[in-house]
Amino acid sequence: MSDNPIAASYLYLLEPEIRFLEAAVEHLIPTDELGPGARDAGVVVYIDRQLAGSWGTHGRMYRGGPWMEGTPQQGYQSRFTPQEVYRIAIREIDQHCKGAFDRPFAQLPGDRQLGLLQQLEKDEIALPSLSAKFFFDLLWRNTDEGHFADPLYGGNRAKVGWKLLGFPGLPSGEYRHLVTSSEPYHAEPVSVLDVQTGRVPVDAEGFPKHVIIKRDRSN
Amino acid sequence: MSNAKLKSVDVVVVGSGVVGSIMSMELASAGLSVVCLERGKSFDVNTDFYKPNVYDELKFDRHSDIFQNLARDTITFRNNATQTALPMREMGAFKPGEMVGGTAAHWGGNARRFLPHDLEMHSRIKERYGASFIPEDCHLQDWGVSWEEVEPYYDQFEHIFGVGGKAGNLNGEIQAGGNPHEGPRSREYPNPPTRPSYEGRLFADAVSSLGYAPFQGPTAAMTADYRNAYRVQMLECARGGFCSSHVCAQGAKANPLTSVHPALARQPTFELRPLCNVLRVNTDSTGKQATGVTYIDARGNEVEQPASIVVLGAYCFSNTRLLLLSGIGTPYDPRTGTGVVGRNYSYQQGSTVHVFFDDREFNPFIGGGQLNTSIDELNGDVIDRGPLGFIGGAYVNTSARGAAPIKGKVVPPGTPRWGGEWKKAVAYNYRRNMAITSHGTCLSYRGNYLDLDPTYKDAYGLPLLRMTFDWNDNELRMMKWVDERCAEIGRALNGSRLGGKTKGTHFGLVGYQSTHNVGGAVMGSDPSTSVVNKYLQSWDVPNLFVVGGSAFPQNPANGPTETIGMLACWAADAIRENYVTRPCGRI
């Protein structure tokens, strides 16, 4: 991995955290023949922006105590904000890796990283301050969001998540006529970012103009 | 903080959503002075939900500032009374709104009336199957109103919200193309029905082969440009997705902001006060007469607004909590079964069967606006419940969903949760599946209720509302039967694989389910089992009306918003025609 493959800047995350997350999210959504994985999609930048914003400090979440573990049905009960969860969990996972393998997570071989992520998911690693599964679930939720949210938020670079699905992004004004059609519709995806920055023109109603992708029906 | 007591008005309305806006409109247009208090911010529907920014799934689905600000006020939750309730710290299973326009500003537009059966569920079940058919500890109740009484108010609401559909029963005559199982309606829908999507046509063929009668479900997303009963113009839905959880950029989805507030703002005797958080309803020394409400205004001042009539028209949780905080009515006690405020809290069942295809490709991103093809044979008691042994049912449909890329991805069962195989599966299946969705009844039970939490407080130091709720055996057996029927439909669609998603055995806060929280201040004809009478008038304080989802004695299958709107029209008419002429008495 190059030092900074996507020329990113960071507001909240620290260098070891960036390394950890770049390695981890690439296992969650890997690069393959279908296209870039989460690392090159900018998911770590997405996570950084989310942590630095209102969600990262649980700005609109209930923060009053007392704090108890709760049942799975009771949802998020950690006394840590997402900012704190990432900071604490990554440090403690790296400490675990250094103790067990003499290296932080990011410097371990890929198959060992994969095994560790599976252990975190199953809560098989006892971190001192929080549940490994709780951190893993939050990381996976944010990775999925970052890979598929509008590129406005720093992830889904070049709309790789939407291209993966065949999701055209913002609707075209033609959808009202296409909604009854059985013909598959494929268009170059358009993002909020594209329209805000003037890269894609809009019609009189404000709908973006789609560029249709012609496809071989046998695909 | 300073205190102020304002000049008295005829009516103070708490909440500016479906109930608050319609009741304000109906009462102000009759000449009454009306002040409407809303805890959320004011929005201009013409400028504040604009393209392209509205097409932002992350913002509106996950981090929205039009949902309740939980930092100030949330609920606590537990599955049963042996547990300790803990605060709902982030938004999950449901998304109560917080804005002028209320929760319905971001609703999905599903505009179904209830079935006549639903309003008289207790009597009809007892008559058809006997009292022993009702589960022990189930608080099955009638609403105290008949279909014939409320039908005109459903019709009124549909002409405010511009509902599109095809009548299935016009004055008792079954109509081709509509839902043959609906209650008789006095006239056609104000707008035409939707035209079926590709998925809808496949669904219609499959269900027809199984003997069901498909129809296009009613929708409050305009199926044609429409000027409503309040002379407000709405535009035809453009089927661009980003619908439920979002405010419509096209102004095509009827909601209080698009359909009522523009007309309300022109009423000379009406005043809207946003950013005002009501703390309690005030009563006189006898406790039998409301004198107004006390609220905290935007600048933090405590303000008393005296009024001759108080209308609580807020979300189910807020209506119930304000009664408890105000000491109005007897709080429900599940140990003794006595008391009424907080009794009969209920929610919504439902599930999804996914049909995966290798030989079909869809456009799942096109749609929204409840463009759906439905059946109603599994609803109510259309099919004899006797041999099935449960009460309730579901409507079943497939819709052009406007499937968004974060929450709209589905994969076949057995797919790993993440990694390369997951990536391949989402890429392959996003456009190769359709969903058969069921939306089911949830009855009310002795152990499911709302009260004040003993520990957790809101930003004003007042106790949070505590929800004690879990699924009961009747609902789980009902959904098992519904899921089996949906799987049959799925097999008739000849896909390559079936998948599915249920709500599980225990209710939990994690992951969105439905913003259909109901009950807590239910309507009825017996003060020992209801908080308000059939006109939504408090049994204890006759100049207080408590209107909304809070009034549902149990939750039928069909989604609450249409009936909440109907109740607003019904209660406003009762106040205007029967109460104002002889106030301080029982209607």
Image (spheres, coloured by chain):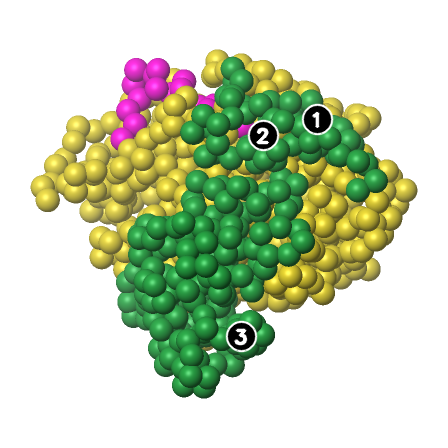
Chain colours: A green, B yellow
Q: Is residue B404 left or right of residue B117?
A: left
User: Disc 3: which chain?
Assistant: A
Residue type beneath disc 3:
Pro
Q: Which contiguous range is marked in magenta?
A: B252-273
Residue type of the residue flagged with mark 1: Leu
The residue that mark 1 highlights is A178
Q: Amino acid at mark 2?
A: Pro
Quadrant that contains the C terminus of chain B:
top left
Q: Chain of mark 2?
A: A
How far from the left and from the top, in percent, is residue B332?
Answer: 42, 60
* Residue B504: percent from left, percent from top: 62, 64
Q: Residue at x 45, y 25 (%)?
A: A198
Alpha carbons under labels 1 and 2: distance apart: 11 Å
Residue B214 shows up from this direction: no
What residue is pinned by disc 3? A109
Q: Residues within 10 Å of mark 1 (few under 14, many from 20)?
A: many
- The answer to whether the residue labelled 2 contacts the one labelled 3, judged by CB atoms less than 8 Å apart, is no
Q: Tell whether label 2 touches label 1 (CB within 8 Å).
A: no
Q: Residue at x 43, y 46 (%)?
A: A154
Residue identifier under label 2: A171
- Label 1: element kind: helix
Q: Earlier in the sequence, mark 2 or mark 3?
A: 3
Tell me the CA gap for discs 3 and 1. Answer: 49 Å
In this view, the residue in front, A148 or A156, is A156
**Looking at the image, is mark 3 or mark 1 earlier in the sequence?**
3
